[in-house]
Image (tube, rainbow, N blue to C red):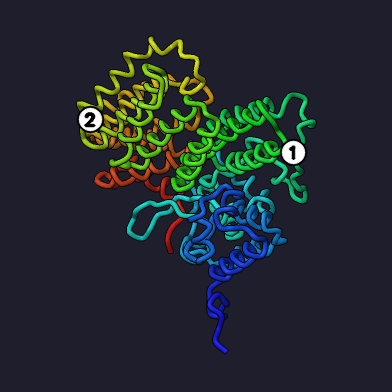
Amino acid sequence: MGQQPNALTPEESPQHRFGYTLRELRKVRRFSLRGLADEAFMSHSKLQKWENGGRVPRDRAEVELIDSLLRAGGILVDQWERIESPVSASSRVSVSTPHVSEASVGLAAAASQQATSDHEGTFVPARLRDGSVVFVALDRRAMLRGGAGLGAAAALGVGTPAVASPSALPGLKRPARSAAAYSSTPVEHLQRVRRLLIDNDNLLGPGRAIAATREYIEDIKRLRQDAKGADRHALMELQTQYAEFASWLYQDLGDFDSAQFWLDRAFQWSHTVADTDLTSYVMARKAQLAGEMRDLVDVVDLAEAAQRMARPRSRLAAVARTYESYGHALRGDPTDSERAIDDVLNSLDRISGDTTPWGVWLTAQYVEVHRAHGLEELGKHAEAAEIFTSAIESLPDGYHRDRGVYMARAAVAHAGAGAPDEAAAVGLQALTVASDTGSGRIVRELARLDKALVPWQRQPEVAEFRTHFDGLLAHES
């Protein structure tokens, strides 16, 4: 008798075994591929790649969610754990000894304490054999078992959770949400939680906040099932806001695929809410993300689309125009880049009375930082370094991660201006913040700095920075 087309052969890998089991369970539970993807808040193309064995799930939380939705009793999680990742902690990636900062000692201690409960996969900066720096997905638990170095543990963003969640406590199952459980309304409670997550993000980085944010999105979805009228609408709006924040966390972590996915979800849900300002803001964020990904094709088009969607002469139109300026710089057009920045600066007084809650951080300093970002891209390194330095000095307390981003960009600008000693000194400061927060945005800038400093690698200050930066990275064996 011939073998059935979908039968699993003994030679197939654990990755394909996982996909086969997932597909069969989905069919038994009578889920369509798209239906299960919608329930899990993920793209159906990603789920299809899991089923076909074309992609290894890198996020344990997603696997656990699918396992729960399919009532698999942990079978999928168990099979996922058996998959040998294409880049695994035990085979191709080794973790070097750290040389970063004493501020990270608490993070390393917290990592060992959380080894039994914190298994979510994460993006880690790694140096390949050719010297380039990339972000790879690793299983945090596997790294802890393998004795991850201090620098790598810090890069994971492991530390005190921004908001404690039931799933972070061993043996405690997250209960269904009840509206009567809150002293205020559920919407007011979740709005306060989101504000707390946002505030702590700048201090602690994105790593721990991602799991909490995604859990709250699930909570909101469950609350919406019984809500009606204005309450249901308010919850949908809040769900959109959480999705946008999840996108931001993934963007800061360096996981651009997930950042794009959650921004797409936020954009879709914002139309359900019918909040023009919110939709315009999400579109502007799409332009910002495209700029961070150095997408020369989309960034200006997305920014212009956001401006068309925004109210004329509004703050959100100015936000989108700010992101457009960097797109022009990426394309090598200094005239249009400077014109866009000047337009935004000239509009600040006019938009100061705009009542929208979106883009309230659009200040002259914020705009100048974006000017510097564009100037650096256009090769005007000394001017960019001066603006970044001024912005660092003006940042209020609590903007720890943003300070690190600005310092990393200032260091790159100093290197471009031919000041390697200053570049290395500022880069070391940014490295401490990267270690504290696990910000992939800082690490990406420092990878650029590391490459830019190669001509001066024998200078003591430069060698010190490059050694410390190398200690933060996992390494290809």
Residue type, numbered disc 1: Arg
Q: Residue at x 64, y 45 (%)?
A: 110
Give the amino acid type for the residue marked by disc 2 in the picture: Lys
Residue 380 is tagged as 2
Q: Are marks 2 and 1 in contact (CB under 8 Å)?
A: no
Q: Earlier in the sequence, mark 2 or mark 1?
A: 1
Task: Residue at 58%, 60% (x, y): give it.
Answer: 146
Q: Is residue 255 left or right of residue 458?
A: right
Q: Nearer the viewer, residue 144 or 3?
A: 3
| Residue at horizontal 35 percent and vertical 29 percent from the top | 323
Q: Is residue 285 above or below residue 345?
A: below
Query: What is the number of the mark on residue 177?
Result: 1
- Which residue is more in the foreground, 457 or 114? 114
Q: Residue furthest front?
A: 229
Secondary element under disc 1, as helix, strand or loop, is: loop
Q: Between residue 442 and residue 233, name the one nearer to us.
A: 233
Query: Does the rendering let one see residue 221?
Result: yes
Please provide percent x and percent y for residue 207.
56, 42
Query: Quadrant of residue 385 in the image?
Result: top left
